[in-house]
């Protein structure tokens, strides 16, 4: 019995070492290499009515400077200053969801958390997935700069059915390159991000246009990323 326990302990130790080694290595490697594909892209291929995957990697310098401001104004205004988690937003969301369970659940994921989920994990709400999301969020905050996190986020985020990243949505919906997007167009794209398969920046609803105006107004108060 003792030998079996020792063997199980050694297997567990090797398993943990392998897990931490491979995950840390993958984060370090992707600090330098473009992220061309993510698990979500392949999952969506089988969920959509048509096989569509539009994605072109571009650097942060090849994007409109308004695009990072727009997503921060929409998704995570404290992004330049926090370490991956917005605890005030988490507390507020937990309180609101408890007091109003009949409403759609309010999320509090930061851009760092969304990047970790998009690049390394799969969609879902299980505790295992959320735990891994927190783990990868800490890793990318440690090993990547804020500019790199934003660059990967804006290249990997879903921006429409089968459309991933700012370059792809610029081409598909506005007929231009990411660097040529206007401030209004960036705010419009950001307005769809809570549910890019339901909301469209190509044919925006009244609700999306309202969010666009709010985001455009809030962009002036967002702290830009330092280079």
Image (cartoon, grey):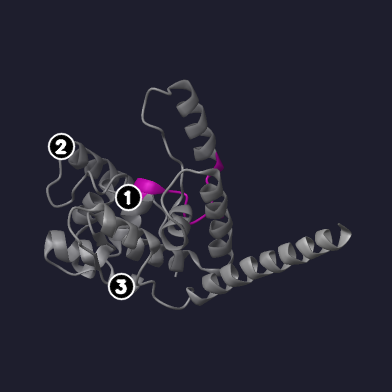
x then y, percent, for residue 111:
43, 54
x then y, percent, for residue 117:
45, 56
Residue at horizontal 63 percent and vertical 71 percent from the top:
21
* Up/down of 14 relative to 203, above or below: below
* Up/down of 207 relative to 45, above or below: above
Task: Locate the C terminus by quadrant.
Answer: bottom left
As drawn, which residue projects farthest toward the right? 2
> Which SS type dominates the magenta stretch?
loop
For the question of whether residue 220 can be seen, the reply is yes
Measure the C-alpha gap from mark 3 to mark 1. 25 Å
Q: Is residue 13 left or right of residue 159?
A: right
Front-most of residues 110 and 222: 110
Q: Is residue 102 magenta?
A: no
Q: How many marks?
A: 3
Residue designated by label 3? 57
Residue at horizontal 47 percent and vertical 73 percent from the top:
30
**Part of the protein shown in magenta:** 73-87
Q: Are marks 2 and 1 in contact (CB under 8 Å)?
A: no
x then y, percent, for residue 17:
69, 69
Q: Is residue 223 left or right of residue 137?
A: left
Front-most of residues 136 and 206: 136
x then y, percent, for residue 90:
52, 38
Residue designated by label 2? 206
Residue designated by label 1? 219
């Amino acid at each position: 019995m003792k030998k079996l326990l020792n063997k199980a302990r050694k297997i567990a130790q090797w398993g943990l070492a392998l897990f931490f080694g491979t995950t840390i290595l993958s984060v370090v490697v992707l600090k330098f290499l473009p992220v061309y594909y993510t698990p979500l892209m392949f999952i969506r291929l089988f969920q959509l009515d048509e096989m569509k995957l539009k994605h072109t990697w571009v650097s942060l310098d090849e994007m409109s400077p308004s695009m990072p401001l727009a997503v921060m104004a929409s998704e995570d205004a404290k992004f330049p200053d926090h370490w991956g988690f917005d605890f005030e937003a988490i507390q507020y969301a937990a309180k609101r969801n408890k007091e109003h369970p009949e409403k759609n659940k309010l999320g509090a994921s930061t851009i760092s958390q969304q990047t970790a989920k998009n690049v390394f994990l799969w969609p879902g709400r299980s505790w295992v997935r959320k735990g891994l999301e927190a783990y990868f969020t800490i890793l990318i905050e440690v090993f990547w700069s804020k500019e790199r996190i934003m660059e990967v986020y804006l290249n990997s985020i879903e921006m429409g059915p089968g459309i991933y990243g700012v370059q792809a949505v610029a081409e598909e919906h506005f007929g231009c390159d990411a660097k040529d997007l206007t401030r209004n167009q960036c705010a419009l794209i950001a307005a769809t991000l809570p549910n890019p398969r339901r909301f469209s920046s190509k044919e925006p609803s009244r609700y999306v246009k309202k969010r666009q105006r709010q985001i455009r107004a809030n962009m002036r108060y967002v702290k830009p990323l330092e280079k």
